[in-house]
Image (cartoon, rainbow, N blue to C red):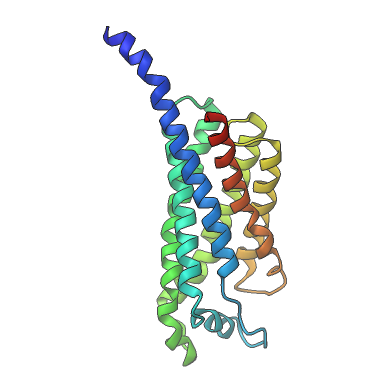
Amino acid sequence: MSKTTALASTPHRSHRLDRTAAVFLLLGGLAFFAGGALHPKDSSTGGTKLEQLHDMLVDPLWYPSHLFSLAAIALITAGLIVIRRRGDLPGRMARLMSVVAAISVLATVAMLVHLFAATEAEAIEHGHSTTLIDFHTWNETIVNPLWALAIATLAVAGGLTHTLGNRITLVLGLVGGLAFAIATATIAFTDLFDPLFPISSLIGAWAAAVGAIALLRRS
């Protein structure tokens, strides 16, 4: 009786986990797009990178945009963790999912630090950097690109194996991930790749599409 019950409950549990992960990814994707759309811009009047950062830190949209971005990465992370816990992924995909989920947890913490960088606006206005700003800079040029590349890799692997999206969502995640990786890795040093930031919103499109496809399949 207990064996029969266990076998009967397994599909139901898998269904619930899949649906939960899909909702997390869908909401995370939408939040990522919103965060990018609201992100403040510098005054575009030249100056140093620190001065350009100050322009964005004092913008009223700093906190709303980065709260959306924090929610986005946290929700995507939660979705990946739920999928990994499902236990029925192929070996290589399971290992990749574990690595990407771990990087995504790190990226969530990093985005929290990024959010509170605005508290240092006054110090920057007086021409000073701070420990938090220095940490923020290294975080943005290392952790964000690492997360973006991890998402791009997962999008490709998931699309090819049809375990996470398909070959269409693969393109969204790959292009968005590469754009975000290049833009964030270079933002502290040059404006050359700033036009890639709008393209990086395709990460949100990837997550939302993967979540929507999973929900439609389950329904």
Outermost residue toward the front?
A: 219
Q: Residue at x 63, y 74 (%)?
A: 189
Q: Position of residue 126 (x, y in %)?
A: 47, 93
On screen, residue 65 versus residue 170, left or right, reads left
The answer to whether any part of residue 29 appears in the image is yes
On screen, residue 94 versus residue 171, left or right, reads left
Q: Residue at x 63, y 85 (%)?
A: 43
Outermost residue toward the top?
A: 1
| Residue 38, above or below 213 | below
| Residue 42, above or below 162 | below
| Residue 210, above or below 145 | above
| Image quarter (top left, top right, bottom left or bottom right) of the N terminus | top left
Residue 36 image-quadrant placement? bottom right
Q: Residue at x 48, y 54 (%)?
A: 73
| Residue 55, above or below 218 | below
Residue 51 image-quadrant placement? bottom right
Number of labelled discs? 0
Q: Position of residue 47 (x, y in %)?
A: 63, 88
Outermost residue toward the left?
A: 2
Q: Which is more toward the observer, 136 or 207?
A: 207
Q: Which is more toward the observer, 208 or 42?
A: 208
The answer to whether any part of residue 130 appears in the image is no
Outermost residue toward the bottom?
A: 126
Residue 199 image-quadrant placement? bottom right
Q: Position of residue 78 (x, y in %)?
A: 43, 45
